[in-house]
Image (spheres, grey):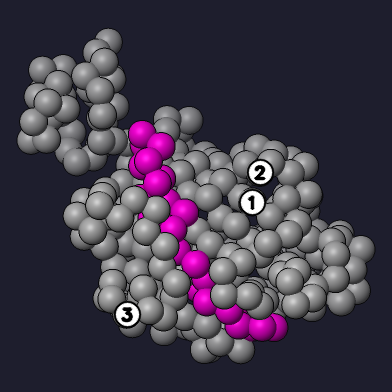
Amino acid sequence: MPVNLAALIIAVSFLLTNPSALFGQEFVAYSAAGLDAAAIQAVVDAFRNAIGSPNNGNAPGPLGSGRREINWDGGGSATSPAPTPFTGFQLNRGALFTTPGTGFVQAPPSGLATTFNNVTYTFTTFSPLRLFSPVGSNITDVHFFRPGTETPATVNAFGAVFTDVDLPESTSIEYFSPEGESLAKLFVPPAKDGLSFVGLVLTNERVAVVRIASGNTAPGPNESGIVDVVVLDDLIYGEPLVGPPTDADQCKKGGWSEFEFPRAFKNQGDCVKFVETGK
């Protein structure tokens, strides 16, 4: 179920990176933690419903409604390494992945144990079979694009499932505007050996980039009371749309015709008017 801001601050250690800006926004945050998929399913489904249907899969954009999802399971039981940037979903689902580390891996739990040379890793999956992790880092940045193109876009919502969050402030998602302003940062509730979910749906802002901190260390070492190794499962986010324009120069040289949010523009002047007045 969606939770209100007051409850979220108390229950989820919700950090306001820019309190004066964020309190002026309209948003709903979703959070759940439990031993298995069933324990968080209702909250994940509520988040999906808040964004809207259908799941647009690999359909080219722009699409006027629905959401995108990535569950990493298309490769079955195989382990698939990927470089940084990881462009596998940039064109078909509008998400580009980068990391300060050396790349990424998609694998079932046994494959992650092999990849990171640690037999103690026995992660739980939300959607079998595979999970996702950066290699050489605990940071994943997700940049959004109009599906089917290389045109940067924004989304109105983003959420993720995490596995084996042990510590209350080791794992987070931070949301950034097209101008690079931090809009919010959600800490993920712990569920040792289980699954956790957080997601944010915004009404008045659009998100261009999210930064995911999975645990407090890059996968590899054994876990301890201060070392928390976390990996990702499903990602769910709003349909990527181009816009809004934030500078009049973006409206020039035909740029006005690229925007889809908050609406399509009639011409350059209409686009510039929006930048100046918000209407």
Q: Quadrant of residue 54?
A: bottom left
Q: Quadrant of the C terminus?
A: top left
Tag 2 residue: 99
The residue tagged 1 is: 139
- Taking the spot 48% from the left edge, 30% from the top edge, the residue there is 150
Q: Nearer the viewer, residue 204 or 82?
A: 204
What span is in magenta? 174-197
Circle 3 — which element? helix
Find the distance from the CA under tag 2 to the CA under tag 3: 32 Å
To which quarter of the image does residue 228 belong? bottom right
Answer with left or right where residue 165 lies relative to residue 6: right
Q: Is residue 181 magenta?
A: yes
Nearest to viewer (mark 2 / mark 3)? 3
The amino acid on which the numbered mark 3 sits, given as a three-letter code, is: Ala
The residue that appears at 28% across and 35% down in the rendered structure is 243
Residue matched to label 3: 7
Q: Amino acid at mark 2?
A: Thr
**How crowded is the residue under tag 1: few (<14 C-alpha within 10 Å), some, or many (20+)?**
many
